[in-house]
Amino acid sequence: MSLFVWMMMGIAVWHFAVWVPDKFWGGIVGALVAATTGAVIIGFALAGFKIIGRHDLYLGIAFEAIPGAVAGLAASWFYGRHLELHPRRKRHRAARA
């Protein structure tokens, strides 16, 4: 049940991505994946690498996922910005010949 809570909190934090310029790696969908993944990974680590059952949940479990979601969004944004500032040069076979 805690996995569901972490995922929902990641999605809730993801909604605030509209307030920053869209430089996320993969666009807004990439931001969704990054926020959800970050929330689950950090929530899982803070829970001692175990899934908490339905009867052991408390409100603090949801708040544990917020730093992970923010970190995932930040990582996605900075990587996307890096790719935008430093594009790779594409070499075509026709250009080499």
Image (tube, rainbow, N blue to C red):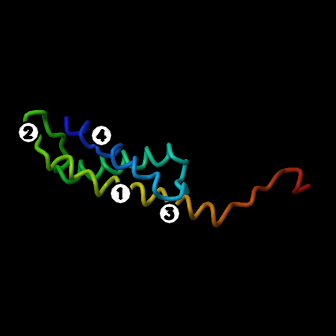
Q: Residues within 10 Å of mark 3 (few under 14, many from 20)?
A: some
Q: Quickly name the residue at label 1.
A: 70
Q: Quickly name the residue at label 4.
A: 8
Compare marks 2 and 1 and give the one earlier in the sequence.
2
Please name whichever residue, 89 or 78, is drawn nearer the observer in this view of the structure: 78
Q: Nearer the viewer, mark 4 or mark 2?
A: 4
**Is residue 96 depicted above or below 61 in this figure?**
below
| Secondary structure category for the residue under label 4 | helix
Q: CA distance from mark 3 to mark 4?
A: 23 Å
Q: Do tag 3 and tag 4 residues touch (Cβ < 8 Å)?
A: no
Q: Amino acid at mark 3?
A: Phe
Picture residue at 16% right of the left edge, 51% below the top: 48
Q: Quickly name the residue at label 3.
A: 78
Q: Quickly name the residue at label 2.
A: 56
Q: Amino acid at mark 1?
A: Val
Compare marks 4 and 1 and give the one earlier in the sequence.
4
